[in-house]
Image (tube, rainbow, N blue to C red):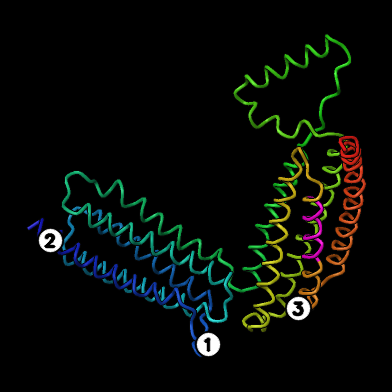
Amino acid sequence: MGKAAKEHLNRTLTEHLNTIHETMQVLDQNPTSNLDKVSWNEVIKLGDQVSKQATIAGMLWTGERREVKELDENMAAYFNVLQGFLLLSHGSKVGAGPTLSSLIHASVKQVVDCSFMLFKESVSSYGSSNKNPKLSIPSLVGTVWDACSALKKNPPTNIMAIGRTMTQVAVSIKDVLREMKELKPASSEPNDEASEEASVKAETDAHDSDNSSEGDWGNDLSPEEMKIAQSAIGVVSETLSVIKELIRSITGLIKHENLDNGNDFVNSLERLLKLGQGIGLQVDELGASLYPPQVFPDIKAVMEKISSIIDELQAEIDNLKGSSEEFCQACAALQGSLRQIESELGCFSATQLLPEMQNLLVSN
């Protein structure tokens, strides 16, 4: 009887899982424009119902007497609510751009995945002498609670979704800036045998140390390279200010919330995000290019790309009528820093080129 009951529960669970998988395929698609938009608050409310159903399931499947009929009914009730939750989530994607849609999908999928784990473990533990449901099921119920609770933190609009994702760009740039500030110039040249001996010994000890492989990177910048690094730090610092002001400008667009689902408005927001992420990538390139030996033309190319992206950013935010005086000032300060470092790069490149030309003339 126990084996037959477990097989029955497995078949029932498989049917429910297949139904949810089919519904998830609907969620993967963009809803049609004639579908009524569902408020994200409605999704949150039904998520609370999923959480309550998980609590009921936890108590039932860990109970001393677990009748198959009750367990069947519990699964049916749970997955019925879960399917309704998925359909509402699909409706909430009406007018959503790629960024908001992606965040919605990730949040909803987490609820589904946790639900699957809960019931797979519940059915697996039924009638098993090797598994104690009171040990495993409560923690899985907790993961469902957490996933449903996380729905409340999901951005409900395109504006908030773009702003949040842009914040991740700012965090990445801040990390690069911190690493750049750790760059150090080369040690002074030894003037006598004693200092040379000490320098050799210190270098040997560093190579022998287990922690030397990463800690000494960037400690041998020439004076010219160090000057470029300092100027680059200024550029990245100004870039961070631009991104911060851009985020403020984007979140300030909330006054245009009635346009939030319009195609042109959403497309402009997505372009702003793409441009911001492009700046983040160039900052990564810049940070990596400061380690010796620096290739000045490569650094200059990065600066030119950042300058070009800033021009595009300003044009796009102006198009949305979301530009602020602070944002314009931040962009102007960054462009000034870019011009300064490009000038320095030109001087150092000429200094580097002169000995090479002299060597070429001598060899001829």
Mark 1 = which residue?
33
Three-letter code for the amino acid on which mark 3 is drawn: Leu
Badge 2: residue crowd in 10 Å (few <14, some 14–19, many ≥20): some
* Marking on residue 276: none
Tell me which corner region of the image, top left, top right, bottom left or bottom right, holds residue 356. top right
Measuring from the top left, give residue 350's x and y in whole percent. 91, 45
In the image, what residue occupies the spot 63% across and 63% down? 165
Of 64 and 19, which appears nearest the observer? 19
Labels 3 and 1 touching (C-beta < 8 A): no
Give the answer, above or below, for where 43 lies relative to 172.
Answer: below
Q: Quadrant of residue 250?
A: bottom right
Number of marks present in the image shown: 3
Is 85 placed above or below 179 here?
below
Mark 1 lies on a secondary structure that is loop
Q: Residue furthest front?
A: 364
Q: Residue at x 22, y 52 (%)?
A: 125
Q: Which residue has dot 2 on it? A: 5
Q: Is 265 on the left-hand or right-hand side of 324?
A: left
Measure the C-alpha gap from mark 2 to mark 1: 46 Å
Q: Specify the segment rendered in magenta.
A: 299-310
Q: Amino acid at mark 2?
A: Ala
For mark 3, what is the residue? 320
Q: Tell whether 263 sits left or right of 246.
A: left
User: Residue 126 in magenta?
Assistant: no
Taking the spot 32% from the left edge, 74% from the top edge, the residue there is 80
In this rendered view, identify the residue nearer to me: 311 or 132. 311
Q: Is residue 188 above or below residue 298?
A: above
In the image, residue 98 sits, relative to residue 213, either above or below, namely below
Among numbered discs 3 and 1, the one appearing first in the sequence: 1
